[in-house]
Structures are given as C-alpha cells and as structure tokens.
Image (cartoon, helix red, strand yellow):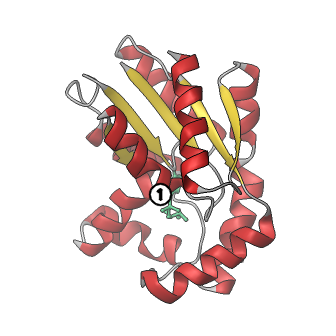
Amino acid sequence: MINIALFGPPGSGKGTQSKLILEKYGLTYISTGDILRQEIAEATPLGLAVKSIIERGALASDEIIMQVIESHINTDALSKGILFDGFPRTNAQCYMLEDLLGKMDTALNCMIFLDVPEAELCRRMLERARTSGRSDDNIDVINRRLEEYHQKTLPVIDFYEERGKIFHIDGMNSVEEIFSKITDVISKSL
Ligand code: AMP
C-alpha cells in the first residue's frame, strides 16, 4: 500500500504529475479541489457552501474538508493506496489525515513538495486562466490564493519535515525529469 500526498503552491504542476503517478502506481486519487469543483457544478449543499469561498481564492474550512475526505476514503481506496492532491493544506488537516489513516492501520509514506518560485507560479496561473475556464484563475484571486498558501499551508511543510516525510523536488525542471525524481522518492519511501 502506498499513500502519497502531493504538495505545492497553486500552479506548481501538481495536476500534471498526479496523472503520471496514477498511471504508474494505480492509486486512488483524492483531489479536494476537484471534488469541491464537482460539488459546485452539481449545486449540492456542500457546493453551494463553498462556491463563493473558492471564487475569492480563500481556503474552505477544515470542517468541510473533513466531510469531503471522509466521504471519499473507504477500504477500497486503501487496497493499493491513495494519492492526495491539494490535501492536507492546513495544520489541522495534517492531524486529520494522520488520524484517518491511523484508524485504517496505515500511514502516509511521503509528502512530495513541488518547489516553484513565485514569479513563475503567477505566470503559469495567468496562462492557465486563458484556457481553463476556472473562475478562480484571475490575478486578484491568484494573489489571494498565494496569500492563503503562505499563511495557512506553508506550516504543513514543518509538520512533515519534523516527521522526516517530506521530499523537496525542483518544480522548474521538465515534466519528465520531475516525474523521474518523484518515482525515486516513492521507491525510497516504500
Ligand atoms: P486546488 O484545485 O487544489 O487548487 O483547489 C481549488 C480551491 O479549492 C482552493 O483554492 C480552495 O479554495 C479549495 N480547496 C481545495 N483543497 C482544499 C483543502 N485541502 N483545504 C481548504 N480548501 C481547499
């Protein structure tokens, strides 16, 4: 069983690398961002509750994320393992994840941190804004998302650093080079 969390600021290439990891290892994919966008598209009560939060680039509450994760984690998901994308994103969510996996007699193998300089992140997100149609890809919202990242999400690195579970990867390399480094890290963490 392999449980991996892919971590990095918005625009760091998590989505691209997730696809490659899923193809190679056949894991269950849990992307809290994708799940929330789906809930919004289906206008569920949860979707309606988070729509304006996501649109202004803020983070959804830990309670909402707990609900999302609990409803998507199940024994099936754990047969091969899980790739978490965009979760955990706050200190409280780190404890949430430890707890959930602990109850299922498993643990996170590693957190992979895709490191990309801020100027490059803005450039990539603005580029994506032209094609993605995502309502949270515009300059004001991008700035807000980066602010949230610095305030609430960066402490997640310390959490996993203290536990020796975080691996930094330079996100400025090519997609293939990054993926090859990711597979090395996964092999080491097994
Ligand atoms: P993403 O696609 O991962 O960049 O997520 C898009 C948006 O969904 C974020 O800007 C947040 O508003 C919300 N979101 C996704 N995952 C989380 C999370 N783990 N905690 C809080 N908010 C989240």
| Residue 124 percent coordinates (x, y) | 64, 74
Is residue 85 or residue 130 the one in the foreground? 130
Is residue 43 or residue 11 the one in the foreground? 11
Q: Give the answer, above or below, for where 70 lies relative to 39.
A: above
Q: How many marks?
A: 1
- Picture residue at 67% right of the left edge, 29% below the top: 166
- Picture residue at 46% right of the left edge, 85% below the top: 131
Q: Is residue 137 visible?
A: no
- Picture residue at 63% right of the left edge, 44% below the top: 90
Is residue 141 or residue 12 the one in the foreground? 12
Residue at mark 1: 16
Q: Is residue 152 visible?
A: yes
Q: Is residue 80 left or right of residue 170?
A: left
Going by the numbered disc 1, the residue's amino acid type is Thr
Q: Is residue 178 left or right of residue 55?
A: right
| Residue 68 percent coordinates (x, y) | 35, 47
Q: Is residue 51 left or right of residue 60?
A: left
- Picture residue at 37% right of the left edge, 33% below the top: 82
| Residue 116 percent coordinates (x, y) | 73, 57
